[in-house]
Image (cartoon, rainbow, N blue to C red):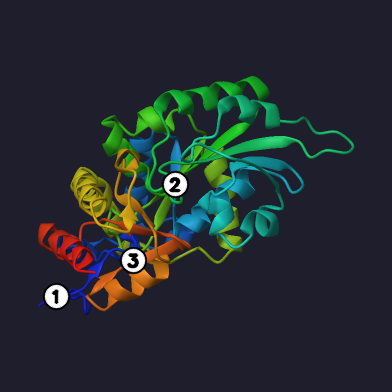
């Protein structure tokens, strides 16, 4: 019997709706535990060591959410009154409720982008030195894959250009890597090919990697030491957190390669929906597990019609909705979704 009361639905709202695997439930039951706030939970330590190794960083910190991971990074990298450079529709700005200003106390200089990738030339022009009048730039924030750009991947050469600019001007680089494993799979490279160009990365375990809760922030030992203090301040210290970290270990060791299946189904959906009257998709722009669908009629009308047929998704603009593919969407559910759209 399914542990998902909505198993009959085709839920394309987000990859956050995935349920844990049987292996995760078993890992939770058998996880050796301690007190993570006191630093002696062996399962948390194992997860953090694994995440640090995969990302090529010195250390890692298990946190409850991707938002917390990002905000700990900002607070640990920056001092209040300093400035960050960030893409204008980045998750850190768009979906984290003003936290950069409220928690880290930073000024956010925003730039437009081409599918989530800011032009390195404009990034360099936006860097300013601190003086009596102007907040100095200390951090460049990236998002890969980019949520509001439809799961777009930042090219490796662009990531390398950001690194060169940051080193030239003495600033740090943070990557919101909530779905960086999708980028890794899409590019067909080790994770370190992406993360070598950043000083810190927050990796979400509870999206396509299927854990119920959690992210890991990876970076230098000094950065993580500062982040631990901020985690405590924000109430993010958890006690027998190894129960959750055990799922994260399964995520990082067993759930990464299968993301290619989600990418494949996203392309199949994009091709099918692009043939339906009143809908259009930039199929070439479908790089990972998200499909942005443009609509002639208001997107909310499509949302309501398809919800009646058991297909769920979110509008992201007046005439655009988003479909997100994940492990709980198999070939049968993909076909059910396509058939429902064709009949609408």
Q: Which residue is mark 2?
A: 149
Q: Is residue 178 left or right of residue 341?
A: right
Cα separation, mark 2 vs mark 3, equals 16 Å
Cα separation, mark 2 vs mark 1, equals 33 Å
What's the mark number on residue 2?
1
Task: Residue at 18%, 76% (x, y): give it.
Answer: 3
Residue 6 pos. (x, y %): 23, 77
Q: Disc 3 on helix, strand or loop?
A: loop
Q: Which residue is mark 3?
A: 313
Task: Residue at 46%, 51% (x, y): give it.
Answer: 148
Asked if one can make out residue 284 in the rendered structure from this viewpoint, the answer is yes
Label 2 Cα crowd, 10 Å radius (few <14 / some 14-19 / many 20+): many
Cα separation, mark 1 vs mark 3, equals 22 Å
Asked if one can make out residue 206 in the rendered structure from this viewpoint, the answer is no
Residue 188 pos. (x, y %): 26, 31
Label 2 or label 1, whichever comes before in sequence order:
1
Q: Is residue 307 left or right of residue 165?
A: left
Q: Disc 2 on helix, strand or loop?
A: loop
């Amino acid at each position: 019997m399914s542990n998902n009361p909505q198993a009959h639905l085709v839920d394309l709202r987000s990859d956050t709706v995935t349920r844990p695997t049987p292996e995760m439930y078993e890992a939770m039951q058998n996880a050796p535990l301690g007190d993570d706030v006191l630093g002696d939970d062996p399962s948390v330590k194992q997860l953090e060591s694994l995440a640090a190794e995969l990302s090529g960083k010195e250390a890692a910190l298990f946190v409850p959410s991707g938002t917390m991971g990002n905000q700990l990074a900002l607070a640990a990298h920056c001092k209040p009154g300093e400035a960050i450079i960030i893409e204008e529709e980045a998750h850190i700005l768009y979906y984290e409720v003003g936290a950069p200003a409220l928690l880290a106390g930073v000024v956010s200089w925003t730039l437009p982008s081409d599918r989530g990738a800011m032009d390195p030339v404009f990034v360099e022009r936006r860097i300013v030195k601190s003086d009596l009048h102007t907040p100095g730039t200390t951090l460049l924030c990236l998002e890969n894959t980019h949520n509001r750009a439809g799961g777009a991947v930042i090219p490796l050469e662009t990531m390398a250009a950001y690194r060169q600019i940051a080193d030239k001007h003495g600033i740090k680089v943070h990557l919101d890597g909530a779905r960086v494993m999708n980028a890794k799979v899409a590019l067909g490279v080790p994770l370190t090919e992406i993360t070598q160009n950043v000083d810190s990365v927050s990796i979400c375990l509870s999206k396509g990697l299927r854990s119920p809760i959690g992210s890991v922030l990876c970076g230098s030992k000094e950065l993580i030491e500062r982040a631990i203090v901020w985690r405590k301040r924000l109430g993010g210290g958890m006690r027998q957190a190894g129960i959750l970290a055990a799922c994260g270990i399964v995520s990082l060791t067993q759930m990464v390669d299968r993301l290619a299946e989600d990418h494949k189904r996203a392309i199949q959906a994009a091709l099918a929906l692009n043939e339906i009257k009143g809908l259009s998709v930039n199929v070439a722009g479908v790089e990972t597990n998200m499909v942005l669908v443009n609509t002639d009629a208001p997107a909310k009308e499509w949302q309501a019609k398809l919800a009646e047929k058991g297909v769920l998704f979110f509008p992201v603009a007046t005439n655009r909705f988003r479909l997100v593919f994940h492990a709980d969407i198999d070939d049968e559910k993909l076909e059910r979704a396509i058939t429902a759209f064709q009949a609408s």
